[in-house]
Amino acid sequence: MPLPAPLRLLIAAVAPPACPACGAPVGGLDDRLCPACAAALPWLGPDTCPRCALPRPCAPCPARGRAWERAWAPFAHDGPARELVAALKFRGRLAAAELLAAPLAAGAGALLDRATLVPAPADPRRSRRRGFDHAALIAAALARRTGRPLAACLHRPAAARQLGRSRAGRLAAGRRAGVVACAPAPETAVVVDDVHTTGATLEACAGALRAAGARRVHVLTATRATGR
């Protein structure tokens, strides 16, 4: 819920707004990127693979055989985009969720047609420690911007941390993630998360939705790691 204007003015007077990516002061009351970070955003552009979301050519496509049909992300996981994700996940800058959702709403296009947004489930231990679920915040912001329904129908037990794992370790952890979906799943589901790295967690989510009855599953993430 937005803060009342007088309270926002008071907060701005005591702690002037700062760019969530670099910390530089920004004018006004709303969280937004400073001009330098906005200009340096690593847009992926239109020529990306519809399966793995990497810039073309992507052969051999790392998403071959995945349970989802299409994947897309507006930014490479680099520069100010990576810092926005870190600001949300690790520094509690919740307004960064709106900044990450805005380009998804503007560019996802047909992936959202007749779709239900499904946030990728976080490790419950980390969600309790942080006090929020970052993917759920991005998905909720995207739902507000697009009017698409939102369903928190994916769950998983506490799992080992993915941060710092090798690619093989992430894939193995994803296979053991035990993601489950409430049945019946939406007919067309769009899994929403912050970062698409190896795709292990996204594959677990898509597979669970398929098992619960989803006919089509797509993947939307705020950023895409381009090192595969």
Image (spheres, grey):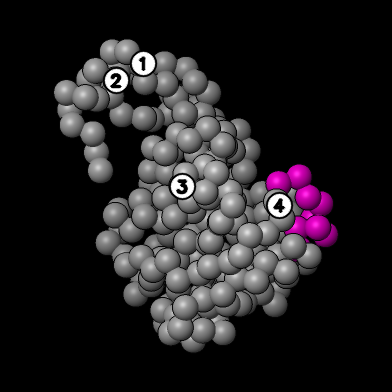
Element type at mark 3: loop
Element type at mark 2: helix
Q: Which residue is mark 2?
A: 11
Q: Position of residue 90 (x, y in %)?
A: 56, 36
Q: Earlier in the sequence, mark 3 or mark 2?
A: 2
Is 69 rendered above or below residue 71? below
Inspect the image, locate mark 1, and give the three-letter code of the amino acid beneath it. Answer: Ala
Mark drawn on residue 162: 4
Residue at the image point whose x is 35% and y is 51% from the top: 141
How far apart in space, not on screen, are marks 3 and 4 (Cα)? 18 Å
Mark drawn on residue 135: none
Q: Do labels 1 and 4 touch, CB within 8 Å?
A: no
Is 105 rendered above or below residue 113? above
Q: Which residue is mark 3?
A: 132
Inspect the image, locate mark 4, and give the three-letter code of the amino acid beneath it. Answer: Gln
Q: Position of residue 132 (x, y in %)?
A: 46, 47
| Left-right relation of 170 to 115 | right
Q: Which residue is mark 1?
A: 15
Inspect the image, locate mark 2, and give the three-letter code of the amino acid beneath it. Answer: Ile
Residue at the image point whose x is 42% and y is 50% from the top: 137
Q: List the single residue furthest toward the top.
A: 14
